[in-house]
Amino acid sequence: MNSEKGKNIKEAKESKPNHSGHNGHDQHAGHSPKMFRDKFWLSLFMTLPVVYWSAHIQHLFNYRALEFPGTDWIPPVLGTIIFFYGGWVFIKGAWQELKAKLPGMMTLISLAITVAFIFSWVVDLGFIQAESLWWELATLVTIMLLGHWIEMRSIVQAQGALQELAKLLPHKATRVTGQGEEEVLVSELQEGDIVLVRPGENIPADGILKKGKSDVNEAMITGESTPVKKEPGDEVIAGTNNGEGSLRVEVTGTGDKTKLSGIMRLVAEAQSSKSRAQNLADRAAQFLTGAALLAAILTLIGWQFAGMPVDFTIVRVVAVLVIACPHALGLAVPLVVAISTTLGALGGLLVRDRLGLEEARNLDTVIFDKTGTLTLGEFRVVAMKTVDDISEEEALRLAAGIEAESEHPIARGILKTAEEKALELPLVEKFRAIKGKGVAATIEETEYYVGGPALLETEKAVIPSRLRDESNKAAEHGQAAVYLLRNGNVIAVFIVADAVRKESKEAIASLHERGVEVAMLTGDSRAVAEAVAEELGIDTFFAEVLPEDKASKVRELQAEGKKVAMVGDGVNDAPALATADIGIAIGAGTDVAVEAGHIVLVRSDPRDISRIVTLSKATYSKMVQNLWWAAGYNIVAIPLAAGVLAGWGVLLTPAVGAVLMSASTVIVAINAQLLRRTEL
């Protein structure tokens, strides 16, 4: 990879959004799903014998474990290994939280396992008469590792948008000098250099076309669906794809000065500036940490003032801290996330960033990119009109048969329309191209021509009045009119345009039913945008919008207090996708759009946006329910553990507290599974 691309990727990595930390503090810094996975499986392997040889578990399930010399040391030895091997990651995370003065889940987990570890050794060494907590310690660490493994898989996504953008630039370029042609790295190009761009190659740098003509595909940068004809003096953009002509381009911008790099910076800024929605579990853990510490301190002070033995007081304090351990809390949200993302995937909704899914329940504005999102991003015949003596189907069959020999995008659109209607193409003879005007061929000994207005001029053909209205309407909407001539007479007109998806109208109607405002952004002309907006019933549209303006339009709506979803499929949509509260990428679009989006629509069906809202609301509801199940029992359990009913003979031991925690974990797991009943 050349140095400029490497630099951009480095910048992208440095500016990755912070999804899991607190306002800049990242509790998962340096962590990975693989690390948590490996620690989980090894800790689980060691936890099983700890649980099996636990005296409390034997008593609870009424069995007697195998005995041989040294079995008494299995729980403390393996428990100690689990504490340092599996639990150390939480202790390090807690240290980071405390340094940031924002104690949360890591602090609560670390407090629980550290108290259990020290207390268990104190008991085993005979300093206090009580039951050790090795099995509670081992299961807590293992379950927390499982929870964080699930969490990391759902929130740590490869930030590949900038890398995908960089791939649009070729690795090497052909520079033209006085001595001939030479192949150089793109990073070596300088302003004023002349580069040769062969047919089908991506343009290596921004520049001015000096020699040659070609149609250049700029859709990935500008959003314009039609290839742009380039002639000497025209500007060309790095990363765009050259058509069939050979071009010589004078370099005007390289590296960070290209428009492509500008888009890359916008994506990086949007990703890094996105505020982190505070995770519900983190807030609950932060509150529970404070509540547990306060309850433990009050318990210590209260029983000491009451004159109780130190042993009794320490057991009470440990019971309070252990029962506050977030077995269920650590799984409450990750389990729901794992199930909701699976449910979404089965329904064609790939969740890349769970924060986007959580926000979707509140969205009130959806902005659609036009090309490739509401439309197919490909030409089709969207309307046609014929003279009396020929049917529309027959005219389309003849035109498609002639255009089958042509590689022009509009010709391919006519052919594709005929194929979708399952029309049988006629046998074509004497095909010939009329440069810049159209094509001609003979079918069943009759000569036919297909082409645009320039062909009519050449053939001095007059458009019949019944076809002229259709042609004028197409011009008003910025659409292309293609004519079929027979023996010099116009017998049909085909209106060719970027075809609207058949699902788009239903998708917008569904959003309107939910009270959601719909807007459209496009790099196409105002006439084209207006035609699509009118056809689909879109509330607002913005035409001829540059990539940086798309992101600013999103920010404008957000400044009005709106929750904005952006739906797009191209490179030019990536900044807006990353800026929006919810970025929704059409799965059939570019890799860049997919990487920048929070949610990907696999089926490229805009109707799925309403289903995202349904999934979001169901997911959020289960999260809240699970958090209450996970933490709510502490309202009763912590006072009991502290001994508020000791005068009536009710005392909650650490071991019983651990059983309650396990029960809440089971409830949380079952409740999360009920999410699968949601109908999308």
Image (spheres, helix red, strand yellow):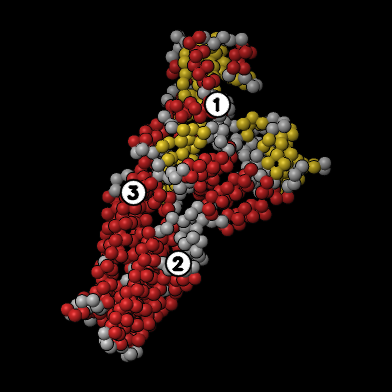
Give how far apart the Cα atoms at labels 3 and 1 are: 43 Å
Kindly identify which numbered label has been placed on residue 617: 3
User: What crowding class fits label 3: few (fewer than 14 Cα within 10 Å), some (14-19), or many (20 or more)?
Assistant: some
* Position of residue 498 measured from the top left corner of the image (x, y, whole percent): 50, 29
Image quarter (top left, top right, bottom left or bottom right) of the C terminus = top left
Mark 1, secondary structure of its residue: helix
Mark 3, secondary structure of its residue: helix
Q: Amino acid at mark 1?
A: Ile
Instruction: Please name the residue that numbered disc 2 is placed on.
Output: 102
* Position of residue 336 measured from the top left corner of the image (x, y, whole percent): 34, 56
Kindly identify which numbered label has been placed on residue 410: 1
Mark 2, secondary structure of its residue: loop
- Tell me what residue is drawn at x 30 percent, y 78 percent: 299
Q: Quadrant of residue 431?
A: top right
- Tell me what residue is drawn at x 57 percent, y 42 percent: 548
Left-right relation of 522 to 334: right
Q: Quadrant of residue 54?
A: bottom left
User: What crowding class fits label 2: few (fewer than 14 Cα within 10 Å), some (14-19), or many (20 or more)?
Assistant: some
Kindly identify which numbered label has been placed on residue 51: none
Judged from this view, the residue extending furthest toward the right is: 178
Which is nearer the eye, 268 or 459? 268
